[in-house]
Image: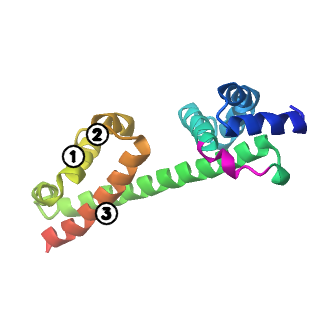
Amino acid sequence: MDADYESFVVSSARRGDERAWRELFETHVDAVYQFCLTLAASRRDRVEEITQQVFMTAASRIHRFRPQQGTFRAWLLGIARNRHMTVAAKEQRRKRHETKAAEGRECSRGRGQPDLEVHETLARLPYRYRMVLEAKYLKGMAMKDIAEVQGATVDATESLLRRARSRFAEMYEQVRQ
């Protein structure tokens, strides 16, 4: 797609023209997917999710695209890189948290009453926090399924889970004392 034509299509997409969006998507989706495939080390589940998020982000933020700073494809790849880094950081934090939780369970087993303390802490949490923690850690549900049950997006559910874990940690320390 040459620069003048791309500028015309982007302008049309900014005005809400669906055909223009479809053309931008069809023109760039393969490149974005391949870029994400490289970033995510071929984890296809993550690649598909990030690729979809790139185009959703682009649709909501197209007014931020500045053609004088680069091509539309470069802008999309920048969004993909940022989204990948965000997803990877979330996964790192989740793994660290789960490792710490597992270590905490190992340490508390010697104390004799970890289940009682955990359940008492859960009982003290607000309902939404308790439900998301129980769904994730006691029932082993996937984030997508929890989000569906909650009637929320996966991102909103992940945010709720982060807040719930934080509040749980605070209250757990109180219960243990």
Give the amino acid type for the residue marked by disc 2 in the picture.
Gln
x, y (%) of residue 40?
62, 41
Give the amino acid type for the residue marked by disc 3 in the picture.
Ser
> Left or right of 52: which side holds 73?
right
Q: State the CA–CA distance, disc 2 to disc 1.
A: 9 Å
Query: According to the image, label 1 marks what residue?
Result: 131
Q: How is the image coloured?
A: rainbow
Q: State the CA–CA distance, disc 3 to disc 1.
A: 14 Å
Question: Which-is-in-front pick, marks 2 and 1?
Answer: 2
Query: According to the image, label 2 marks what residue?
Result: 150
For the residues bearing labels 2 and 1, Cβ distance under 8 angstroms: yes
**Residue furthest toward the bottom?**
177
For marks 2 and 3 on the same chain, the one whose residue lies earlier in the sequence: 2
Residue 61 part of the magenta-drawn span: yes
Quarter placement of the N terminus: top right
Write the residue at 22% across / 43% down: 138
The 10 Å Cα crowd at callout 3, few under 14, some 14 to 19, many 20 or more, is few
Give the amino acid type for the residue marked by disc 1 in the picture.
Met
Q: State the CA–CA distance, disc 2 to disc 3.
A: 19 Å
For marks 3 and 1 on the same chain, the one whose residue lies earlier in the sequence: 1
* 126, 134: nearer the viewer: 126
For marks 2 and 1 on the same chain, the one whose residue lies earlier in the sequence: 1
> Left or right of 1: which side holds 78?
left
Task: State the extent of the magenta-drawn residues as a range.
Answer: 60-66
Query: According to the image, label 3 marks what residue?
Result: 166
* 135, 150: nearer the viewer: 150
x, y (%) of residue 174?
16, 72
Name the image quarter holding residue 44.
top right
Which mark, residue 147? none
Per the image, label 2 sits on a secondary structure element best described as helix
x, y (%) of residue 24?
73, 31
Write the residue at 64% across / 34% down: 16
